[in-house]
Amino acid sequence: MNSPDGCSTFLVRHAWLSLRGVVAEALVAHELSVAQFASLLMLNDTPGMSVADVARKVSTARQSANEMLAGLERAGLVERRPNPNDRRSQRIYLTDAGRVRLDEALPTVRAVEAKLSEGFSAEEIAVVAAWLTRMTQAEQSTTTEEISTC
């Protein structure tokens, strides 16, 4: 899946920025940023993540993730608990209010995705999803020396 100039990297980045803008606009009604929504989604799927785990998953610095999570904590959407294996770190969990906010925001994000997917067949969407999934796993299985550049 390459762009006409043979380099899909910038096409993917441009698509992400465009999608992020539309999703961010939709999430305003739920008083969430894209990173906050993503964090709630991840914590729902994987309770007890560390701040470092969240930072990696939302592609931000640990300090930025910590500040974002502090905002969610002040809003009563997440709570920090001591890590029984490492007294220097904490585990992050959704609160009941966090689950409610996520449950309210999820249909909005899905509606945006459905609107943006109009005109594509189920097969086309499946191919794009498979490609994007494989790209998210590329870091784990490939080194930069093994990748040819654009």
Image: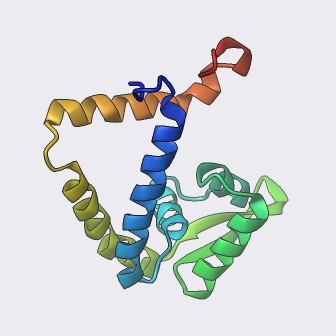
Q: In this view of the protein, which residue sits in the foreground, 148 or 132? A: 148
Q: If the image is split into quadrants, where does the N terminus sit?
A: top left
In this orientation, which residue lies closer to the viewer: 146 or 140? 146
Q: Please, is residue 6 above or below residue 49 in the view?
A: above
Q: Quadrant of the C terminus?
A: top right
Q: Residue furthest front?
A: 5
Report the number of numbered marks.
0
Identified at 50% across, 76% down, the residue is 95
Q: Position of residue 141 (x, y in %)?
A: 61, 20
Name of the residue lying farthest toward the right: 88
The percent position of residue 109, horizontal first and vertical second, equals 31, 64
Using the rendered view, name the quadrant where residue 90 is placed.
bottom right
Q: Quadrant of residue 84?
A: bottom right
Q: Work out whether 60 lies above or below 70.
A: above
Q: Is residue 19 above or below residue 146?
A: below
Q: Is residue 102 above or below residue 3?
A: below
Percent across and percent down for residue 142 are 64, 19
- Quick one: 146 or 101, which is closer to the camera? 146
Residue in the picture at 57% in, 26% down: 138
Q: Answer with the quarter of the image where residue 4 lies.
A: top left
Q: Residue at x 25, y 32 (%)?
A: 126
Colouring used for the render: rainbow
- Residue 100 lies, in percent from the top left, at 36, 77
